[in-house]
Image: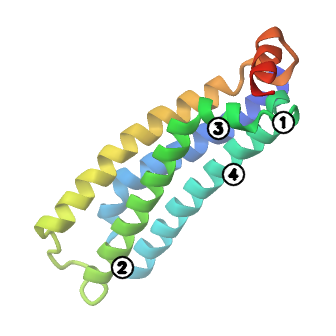
């Protein structure tokens, strides 16, 4: 992929990561109104879904995908796919549980042992998500994925 075409996509991916990081960091400060917190959680979840869509659109744009080596592409990026799915599930669980506990009183103390454990798991999962997603975004900018090369031919021969 040409640098001029890939740069805006990379900036979009960084923007989605930044929005997620910002909302993870400051969403608890905006809990004074349930509707505001709900909108923030929806925005965060939608950003994660958009980030996944962007990665899969980049997958579909590669020469490897177009050559029919989808399995090779999935194997190269399976860690990112798995970590992103786990992080999304953790975010949804945390958001649903937190909103359920806080709905009647937004300023209530909701920090039970289970909620703290889920909160910590989601935050640790966020670190892995940021690492793997950024790594994948940068790796998908490699021109090897967008043109025919010898290593792709070898992989294609292995699959036959």
State the image coordinates of residue 136 (x, y, percent, origin top left). 59, 31
Compare marks 4 and 2 and give the one earlier in the sequence: 2
Compare marks 1 and 3 and give the one earlier in the sequence: 1
Compare marks 3 and 2 and give the one earlier in the sequence: 2
The one nearer the camera, 147 or 141, is 147
The nearer-to-camera label among 4 and 2 is 4
The nearer-to-camera label among 3 and 2 is 3
Q: Which residue is mark 4?
A: 53
- Could you say which disc has been placed on residue 33 in the image? 2
In the visual, does 15 lie left or right of 71? left
The one nearer the camera, 46 or 76, is 76
Which residue does the image show at 30% across and 73% down from the upper left? 98
Q: Secondary structure at mark 4?
A: helix
Residues at marks 1 and 4, CA–CA distance in whole angstroms: 20 Å
Compare marks 1 and 4 and give the one earlier in the sequence: 4
State the image coordinates of residue 7 (x, y, percent, origin top left). 74, 28
Residues at marks 1 and 3, CA–CA distance in whole angstroms: 12 Å
The nearer-to-camera label among 1 and 2 is 1
The quadrant in which the N terminus is found is top right
- Could you say which disc has been placed on residue 74 in the image? 3
Residues at marks 1 and 2, CA–CA distance in whole angstroms: 50 Å
- Could you say which disc has been placed on residue 68 in the image? 1
Q: Secondary structure at mark 1?
A: loop
Q: Secondary structure at mark 2?
A: loop
Residues at marks 3 and 4, CA–CA distance in whole angstroms: 14 Å
- Could you say which disc has been placed on residue 16 in the image? none
Which residue does the image show at 81% across and 23% down from the upper left? 156
Near mark 2 (Cα within 10 A), the count class, few <14, some 14-19 or many ≥20, is few
Which residue does the image show at 84% across and 36% down from the upper left? 68
Colour scheme of the picture: rainbow
The one nearer the camera, 99 or 15, is 99
Residues at marks 3 and 2, CA–CA distance in whole angstroms: 42 Å
């Amino acid at each position: 992929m040409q640098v001029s075409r890939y740069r805006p996509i990379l900036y979009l991916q960084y923007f989605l990561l930044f929005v997620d990081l910002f909302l993870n960091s400051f969403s608890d400060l905006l809990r004074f109104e349930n509707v505001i917190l709900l909108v923030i959680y929806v925005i965060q979840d939608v950003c994660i879904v958009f980030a996944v869509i962007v990665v899969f659109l980049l997958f579909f744009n590669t020469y490897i995908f177009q050559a029919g080596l989808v399995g090779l592409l999935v194997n190269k990026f399976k860690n990112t796919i798995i970590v992103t799915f786990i992080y999304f599930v953790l975010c949804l669980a945390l958001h649903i549980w937190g909103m359920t506990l806080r709905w009647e009183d937004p300023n209530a103390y909701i920090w039970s042992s289970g909620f703290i454990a889920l909160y910590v798991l989601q935050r640790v999962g966020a670190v892995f998500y940021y690492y793997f997603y950024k790594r994948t975004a940068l790796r998908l900018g490699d021109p090897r994925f967008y043109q025919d090369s010898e290593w792709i031919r070898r992989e294609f021969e292995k699959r036959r």
